[in-house]
Image (cartoon, coloured by chain):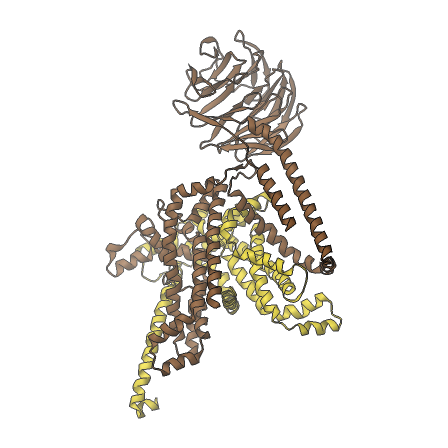
Chain colours: A yellow, B brown
Amino acid sequence: MAMTTSKPSGGAMFSRASFRQLILILCLALLVVLTLVPILFMFYSSLKSNSQILGSFWSLPSPPQWENYAEAFSSIWRYVVNTILYSAGASTTVVCLSAVSGYLFAKKEFPGKEFLFILLLAMMMVPAVLTLIPAYVWYEKLGLTNTPLAIIIAHAAGGQIFGTFLCRTSMEGVPSSLFEAARIDGAKEWTVFARIVLPLSVPILATIFIMQAVGTYNDYVWPLLTIRDSSMQMVGVGLTQFTKQFGITDKGVQFAAYTISSLPLILVFSFGMKYYIQGMAQGALKM
Amino acid sequence: MRNGWKLGLASLGLFVLLAPMNVSAQENWTLDQGKAVTSLSLSADGSKLAVGSYDAHAYVFDQEGKKIADIEAKNVVTGVSVIGNEKLLVSSDDRRLYAYDLNGNPLWELNLKKRVEGVSASTDGSIAAVTVQNSPDLLLIDTASGKVKGKTELGFRVEDAAVAPNGKFIAVGGKDQNAYLMDGQGNLLYKIGIDGTISSIAVTGEGEIVVGLTTPRLIVLNAKGEVVRTVDVLDSVKDVDVTADGRTIGAADYSGNFYLISDKGKVLWKTQVNAPATQLAFDSEAGNLYGGTENGQIHHYSVESVVKGAESAARKALYVNASIAAGLLIALAVLLLVLKKYDRLSVFRRIWKAKWIYLSLFPAFFLLIGFLYVPAFSGLYHSLYDWNPGGRSTYVGLANFRRMLEDEYVTKGIANLGILIVTGLIKAIVPPFIVAELIYHLKSKRLQYYFRTAFVASMVIPIVAMLLIWQNLYDPNVGLINHFLDAIGLGSLSHAWLGDPKTALWSVLFIGFPFVGILQLLVLYSGLLGISEELVEAAKMDGAKFRRIVWSIHLPLLSGQFKFLIILTLIGVIQDFNAILIVTGGGPMDSTYVPALQMYYAATKFDQLGYASALGVSMFFVILLITVINMKFLRSSRD
């Protein structure tokens, strides 16, 4: 501030630059608000009753209808719990498979290695749209439809490809001398993997876990096709069938249900946002 | 090279042998009043078909559907049964049982005082069984004189009764979930409980019974009353029939499927018509099959070739498998010889040494092959078929693909997809790039971090919830968008956004405004961070302005990122139908259809899995083309 008074010309420069910064900030703030409008609208409406939404659209929810949340929770908690369990199951499987395959492809030599890896990668090029319907028929034939396995297997099979790919790249970066030293000390293959490779790979495994969990949590068409029992259904389908299933026409309760359905993701992102962003960036770089 | 040639030959042989057989020439016709077909019966020589209908008529047709006789009853005709090649028995809700010759001349009639619910007679006319309303008895009629000859007390009401063509057995399905078998004189041989509600019954000359249930299931019992097998079909069974020798079973279900099933329980042939099926009948060799529906259609299928072909197909399949096995053995031998010649047999030792590695990789590749490769190849293969899982799939060549070109929903979908792709590309590139530039030009690192996080925060809402929220924003009454327009004085613009075919697609496109995609933003932002400061500083030294820096430095240096985003968007937009399925379901009318949605509907609503696979395969090839072009393009631009 002292500079502005002593050097008027410099002060003009400074204020012009900061004026520019202010414009930038305002533009960004506007865009952030616009991006978040649906979320704000959701939260705002979740505390209103139907008559409050219809009658006084813009006014604050008064009194706030907290009981909307109780009603919404009692209808969708089952879906949310199911989805969390499926996501956890699929992500754990993906992490285990990717860690093992990634390590073997990164650090081991065996006949047919490149062929197997290409077999794996080739599936990345095959879009879900080709396999969706035949996969449904196949799962039906195997008797897997309408069981949690339909969701977990499908996500584990699909997710491990990208997971293995990420793990291979990451584990190739671990210097082999580390393993050799351990092996000379008489460590078994399994010990090397569990004591050296896994601890070094925690960040990449966390990335894979979180990306997979979020992906499974957001699934819609596959459970819609394969799960028929309401008691096993996932949250995405559950939300769309909300009105049909429970005869709930209260908009406020519906919005409350949307809010509740985001809680697990809020939890995941508050701990793992960093890993998720890394995963996205890595995926983008490697493609 | 040599083994490749052998394999090629083997697979060529496979294709030749699996070529489709001649399935069915079919005719169909509809009864004058279009009322439900209540019963069907064929003459012994198969040349004439008697039809009973809800419109209180019984008809006699020849094989081509030419009407020979038209018999009028005073109420719904409940059953018809042809005796030999001459006589026809007709039961009706008008409480009478009639006998006619096949030209429609009356022979006798019998007043039974109660609604007659059905009739079934043996081929030689020695015996006819009749069931009447609310009666626990089965009446046996002398077909020559039209007198009641005897009755069997069952103790429970009858759902359906059938007499074997040779007159030696009578089978009855009771409403009490019991099946009864009697000899030709009406003496009870056995009574057995059935696990389900019986809808219809049929019996062979050897006393084998086929029972259709109201659940999608048939049960076959032998003459001793033991369950021989159960066969599952797709919907509630409406009628069953069986040939005199018991070799072929026919069934009709509520979804309009007709089935021919072998005595081993294998579905030999299946077809679907567009109305619930009510009846079916076939002649003694099962060469001609007739099916009746709830809206008065009669379908005639010549299925002789199928039934006969099934055995030869099984033989052919054996040959194919044997020749494939032989081919593989030869290929293996050749491979071993080649390896030996070049002294490469040590590969087996290395494979053996690495056995733990293969074992560890096994779960991953089991999932990969079992649950990704199998469906992918199944889709490619079945796109050439009229695909009926559990039934018989018919090879149709490229018919599914030709049909796609004529499907109005697909053509409309492709036009919509064009709009979605163009706007999708703009949405994926322009707003994220602007935001990335804005954030990049912020001086404060902390602010950069805050804004980046703020944009990413929108991801905490599950995608489905976000789509449903947008659906609510568009709501004509309680939606934010109309209320906002009202508030700023543009109330005249308010609209049923998703309900109007003119605005629906654009409303779907607008979902996600202002389109700051997180992946796109992060890719471009980290791209900008990767551009060396010196380059920008040098340009600034040369007096380059902000706009010039963006235009001449940022844009060209981000071209890799842009290409990546373009490909990703193309692939994503072609495949994605979640948003449309949830928000509009393709409507109103066909205004928001896309090919992927039509694929989903073909499979789920219309059960046309072959067609759905063909749509999937087409989209796969388009995406493959884009990927291949991209790889070439990227490589050449890197060189």
Residue B364: quadrant of the picture: bottom right
Q: Is residue A18 left or right of residue A70?
A: left
The residue positioned farthest toward the right in the image shown: A186
The residue positioned farthest toward the bottom in the image shown: A6
Residue at left offset 61%, top offset 53%: B367
Would residue B157 be seen by someone viewing this image from the given angle? no
Residue at left offset 36%, top offset 63%: B514
Residue B566 image point, x, y percent:
43, 61
Residue B192 image point, x, y percent:
64, 26
Q: Is residue A120 left or right of residue A67?
A: right
Residue B567 image point, x, y percent:
45, 60
Q: How many marks?
A: 0
Observer-nearest residue: B360 or B489?
A: B360
Residue B317: quadrant of the picture: top right
Would residue B18 be seen by someone viewing this image from the given angle? yes
Observer-nearest residue: B400 or B242?
A: B400
Q: Is residue A127 above or below residue B147?
A: below
Q: Is residue B276 above or below residue B350?
A: above
Residue at left offset 67%, top offset 65%: A108
Q: Is residue A184 above or below residue A114?
A: below
Q: Is residue A174 left or right of residue B387?
A: right
Observer-nearest residue: B302 or A88?
A: B302
Residue A105 image point, x, y percent:
63, 63
Residue B53: quadrant of the picture: top left
Observer-nearest residue: B606 or B452?
A: B606
